[in-house]
Amino acid sequence: MFLPKWKFLIPFMLLSKSLLASHASFFSLYIPVANPQANLMEKDGIELRKILISSFNMDADISGVTWEHKVNSPDDFLRGKDVNLANIKGLTVEAKNYGDKSCVVTIDSSQITSDYKDNELNKILNYVKQATKRTIKENHHQCKIKEIKIPKEATFLEYPKPLNLEKSAFSIFSSYNSGIQEAPFLHDTFYILGYNKGKIAYSIDYETDPRDMVHIETFIQDLVTDEIVWKHEFKKEDNITNINFKSFWNENHKTVIDSMKDYNITLNNHFSLQTDEPHYRNDTLKLTSKTQKEYYKDWGTQFVKSSTLYLGSKEKGQKIIDTKSYNDSQLLEREILGFLNIEKGNRRIAVIVANLYRGWEGPPHVLGYEIIGASLSVGFKK
């Protein structure tokens, strides 16, 4: 007796489907969270919380300790907020030979980029270790823990902190907001390194989406001529998981600082964006910008063709401090964010300019920054 061919196909298809299917598993793990009722450095400022995750990866209950974990809350302020203190850029927790007697879990904090103070970061890392130990025990594994930290000889380094430009930039360009809560804009990260006698040093950590790379450039700029007198470029396109500004600084700080010394610039990271009107002696000044745009039918939008920046004085008139022309740049807007008080007596300022470029596939659009020097005392015409 022969069965029809389709009767053989049914069990074969079912078997094939079960063999090829991937199955996500549920895991329990512990993460460190801040106690909302206490200061981070207080005795009960950090708590270990047990959570449930789902993943296709067998060792997710180890690596998951550093993942983003958003809270589900009726409170609008807390809803969707990442509460995992271990979700720090550059921190990794990875298992090798997981499920075997030779299992080793490595907690690597050597490439961390963080705004936490040293004592806060050390406390968080201690809780990360506790959370990892507790997770290993609960899942009945016999893993040794290995820690990789920043070498002691590198702990003397003063890491530059980024200049906070995003609040002002997001506000100025609010009409271009993507509407995505986690990414209203993509943006470069800007670091001021120091200033002396007309020369300013700074670094830009570029937003490289969609390319998988890290691109950081460091400049020394003459604020009288706006000429770049020294430049250093850092690029990594492969294995960038643990590459960030902090690891760049670990590797290149000596080159950067030695070049700054050539212009008598010492590392000084204590600048902040000023958004009020600049003053010089009894004179009040005002920064303004003007752009001309052209409509591009293929893109269905207007891009900037030219941009001029002005500095006006109540006493002395007005002057152009910068003018640029663009071709096929996909520049949506160019606006002044504010300035830096860089000199005693406030005779010269560094004007911070934001450039908004169209995103790779539309929103979120990309914010880039530049510096333009301006004297508050000379060059005006009525």
Image: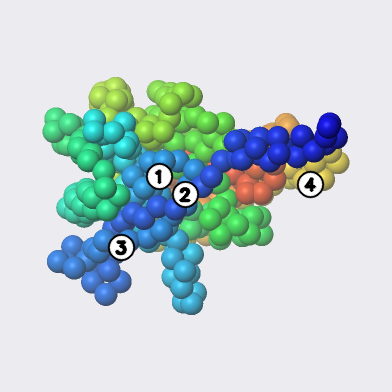
Dot 2: element: strand
Instruction: Work out whether 332 lies above or below 315.
Output: above
Dot 1: element: helix
Q: Badge 2 is on which residue?
A: 25
Q: CA distance from mark 2 to mark 4?
A: 46 Å
Residue 49: mark in rendering: 3
Q: Badge 4 is on which residue?
A: 301
Amino acid beneath label 3: Arg
- Taking depth in this image into account, of 262 and 10 the one nearest to the observer is 10
Q: Badge 1 is on which residue?
A: 60
Residue shown at 26% from the left, 37% from the top: 105
Amino acid beneath label 2: Ser
Q: Residues within 10 Å of mark 3 (few under 14, many from 20)?
A: few
In the image, which is nearer the foreground, mark 3 or mark 2? 2
Mark 4 and mark 3 residues within 8 Å of each other at the beta carbon: no
Residue placed furthest toward the front: 1
- Taking depth in this image into account, of 5 and 324 the one nearest to the observer is 5
Dot 3: element: strand
Dot 4: element: strand
Mark 2 and mark 1 residues within 8 Å of each other at the beta carbon: yes
Q: Is residue 311 left or right of residue 107?
A: right
**Residue 75, image x, y percentages:** 46, 77
In the image, which is nearer the foreground, mark 4 or mark 3? 3
Amino acid beneath label 1: Ala
